[in-house]
Amino acid sequence: MIKIIFFLAFFYWLCLFSSSSFYGNFNLDSTVKSEDGEYYANIYKHLPTSPISIAQILGGNKYFIVLYNKKGEELWRVSYFDYIAEPMKYEKMYFPDEIDSTFICPTNHGYDGHDFSKTIRNHKVVSIK
């Protein structure tokens, strides 16, 4: 019974999440840096590891975005279900700064992002005077 549950969980993971679960220099496409040098976003290629990812890649949706701070710590990534087309890679990204603590990046269905105003560990705290 445990083997069946493990196999079903692995098959579920393989079909849905695996194409963007593993990333590094081997599938890095490009890097976009913030103007102040505090953050950078890497654009990675999805891996063709599942029927869903193969269909998306053949349709031109090959990429996903991950945000890092200048120390190289991963702060945020798009959903496992987001597949980004080539033209979207060249759209403007908005990085957190002293005025706005939100990261915004393009996706096929509009813009996505995360507000880091309540995250102290991964975002510099700016005192308000």
Image (tube, rainbow, N blue to C red):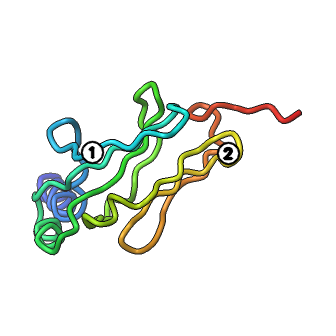
Nearer-the-camera pick, 67 or 37: 37
Q: Which residue is mark 2?
A: 117
Q: Position of residue 86 (x, y in %)?
A: 25, 64
Image disc number at residue 74: none
Above or below: residue 10 compared with residue 38: below
Q: Which residue is painted at 33% across and 44% down in the image?
A: 42
Callout 1 secondary element: strand
Disc tally is: 2
| Rendered position, 124 above or below 87 | above
Q: Work out whether 101 lies above or below 121.
A: below
- Residue 121 screen position, x and y as percent: 59, 31
Mark positioned earlier in the residue sequence (1 or 2): 1
State the image coordinates of residue 85 (x, y, percent, origin top left). 26, 67
Structural crowding at the residue carrying mark 2, measured as other residues with C-alpha within 10 Å and reported as few (<14), some (14–19) or many (≥20): some
Please state the horizontal and vertical placement of residue 19, each as a whole percent of the image. Answer: 19, 56
For the C terminus, give its image quadrant. Answer: top right
Left or right, residue 77 beside residue 61: right
Label 1 and label 2: CA atoms lie apart by: 27 Å
Q: Which amino acid type is marked by label 1?
A: Ser
Task: Report which residue position mark 1 lands on.
Answer: 30
